[in-house]
Image: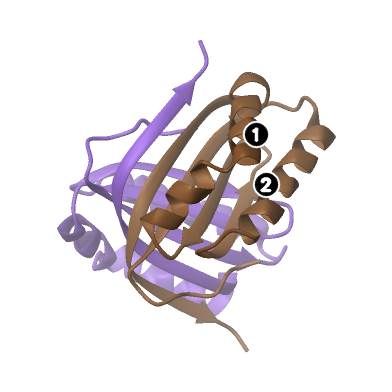
Chain colours: A purple, B brown
Amino acid sequence: MLTATFATPYYAVIFTSLRGDDEHHAYEQAAQRMVELAREQPGFLGVESARGSDGLGITVSYWTSEAAIAHWKNHAEHREARQQGRERWYQGFTTRVCRVERDYAGLKN
Amino acid sequence: MLTATFATPYYAVIFTSLRGDDEHHAYEQAAQRMVELAREQPGFLGVESARGSDGLGITVSYWTSEAAIAHWKNHAEHREARQQGRERWYQGFTTRVCRVERDYAGLKN
């Protein structure tokens, strides 16, 4: 699903990662759990995620403030999941913290 | 492919879109042409793109400055492609212009 747009400025965390085909089900469960947990955090606005058949995935989460991102980064279960991601799931990944300056949405009726 | 990281601050354009299954080949050709054209623009740093089986796609392009983004936005062929996207390819889309404050990469050997 596409998320809504939000009042600017707000913050985006762009997480790009490269995965192989291994442990597909276990990975999907872990990733879904992290989305559910993120939704419960203060300052969470929304999340969008896609992974193509080449193994490249992009997840963008949206937050009200940098403080909210820092709080989520320090969540114990999230820290464990990131550790597991580094060791087990990802061939490579990049995290970018961004300030969203403006947005435009186009939706058909 | 994952892109490199870059010296901060730089800029990201997050383009999220929802597509159906129609005109797959023609769409892929048009999307690939836009990536090739973007690579030739001043201030272009890199691009990452993924589309899942649910039709949600995320493309993030990286730029040295807001001026580079404005220049690309005004490119005649890019304007035509966006018009075609609105009318023909996308059920919905969102564009977000962001300032990347910091990034972290993890790559396995």
Q: Are marks 1 and 2 in contact (CB under 8 Å)?
A: yes
Which residue is found at the position 73% from the left and 52% from the top? A53
Q: Amino acid at mark 2?
A: Met
| Image coords of residue B73 (percent x, y) | 50, 43
Query: Residue lying furthest bottom in this view?
Result: B109
Q: Amino acid at mark 1?
A: Ala
The answer to whether residue A82 is left or right of residue A54 is left
Figure quadrant of the C terminus of chain B: bottom right
For disc 2, the marked residue is B34
| Image coords of residue B48 (percent x, y) | 59, 58
Residue B51 is drawn in which quadrant?
Answer: top right
**Who comes first in sequence, dot 1 or dot 2?**
2
Which residue is found at the position 51% from the left and 40% from the top? B16
Q: How many marks?
A: 2
Residue B11 visible in the shown view: yes
Figure quadrant of the N terminus of chain B: bottom right
The answer to whether residue B25 is left or right of residue A56 is right
Report how far apart the C-alphas of labels 1 and 2 lie in the structure. Answer: 8 Å
| Image coords of residue B13 (percent x, y) | 45, 50
The answer to whether residue A72 is left or right of residue A31 is left
Label 1: state its secondary structure.
Answer: helix
Is B86 or A96 nearer to us in this picture?
B86
Residue A43, above or below B63: above
For disc 1, the marked residue is B81
Residue A33 visible in the shown view: no
Q: Which mark, residue A11?
A: none
Query: Residue lying furthest top in this view?
Result: A109
Which residue is found at the position 60% from the left and 26% from the top? B83
